[in-house]
Amino acid sequence: MFSATKDGDTDRSDILKMVIAACKNYSIEIGKELEDSEIEKVLRKEEKKVKDSIDQFTKMQREDLVEKEQRQLAVIQSYLPTLMSEEEVLAVVKAKMSELSISGKHDMGRLMGSVMKELNGKADGMLVKNVVESLLQ
């Protein structure tokens, strides 16, 4: 953050300040120092907020604000591990389907719960949902 401030990179320093504040707030909320997994959770939450802002600014045709948010999104994503690809998620879902003997759409909740527990934040929830739905059809 300090190097971004010194270099005059206001977008980078602004988003880092917001992320640090969010981490401190969450730390106070749970009453202990954050572990890496909890910091990643906060970063994912901030990433989602920025993506939502990009969607809203795009709808309002505010390209100047969209560009700023996209730069901030890139900063947040540089601190996050990459998410699993669709092929990797597909392999996990198929393995869980055979392990749990899931045959129809009525077992979707049980399958989703099991897969999300195993992936533990390594994949986007919407991607997992789409893969599960496509396999259960």
Image (cartoon, helix red, strand yellow):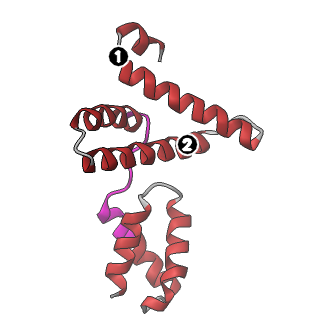
Asked if the magenta segment contains residue 88, the reply would be yes
In this rendering, the answer to whether 133 lies above or below 126 is: below
Residue 85 in the figure: left or right of residue 33: left
Eye-nearest disc, 1 or 2: 1
- Residue visible at 36% across and 70% down in the picture: 91
Please give the range of residues in magenta.
Answer: 78-91
Given residues 2 and 14, the one toward you in this image is 14
Q: Check residue 1 in the rendering and tell me which mark sits there, or answer none.
A: none
Identified by mark 1, the residue type is Asp
User: In front here: 38 or 73?
Assistant: 73
Q: At 51% from the left edge and 25% from the top edge, which residue is drawn? A: 17
Q: Amino acid at mark 2?
A: Val
Residue occupying the far right of the picture: 31
**Earlier residue among tags 1 and 2:** 1
Task: Give x and y (percent) for residue 8.
Answer: 35, 11
Q: Examine the structure image and report whether residue 25 is included in the region drawn in magenta.
A: no
Q: Taking 21 as reference, is 9 left or right?
A: left
The single residue placed furthest to the front in the displayed view is 60
> The C terminus appears in which quarter of the rendering?
bottom left
Classify mark 2: residues with Cα within 10 Å, few (<14), some (14-19) or many (20+). Answer: some
- The residue carrying mark 1 is 9
Q: Which residue is mark 2?
A: 42
Q: Secondary structure at mark 2?
A: helix
Few, some or many C-alpha atoms within 10 Å of disc 1 (few <14, some 14-19, many ≥20)?
few
The residue positioned 30% from the left and 37% from the top of the image is 70
The answer to which image quadrant residue 85 occupies is bottom left
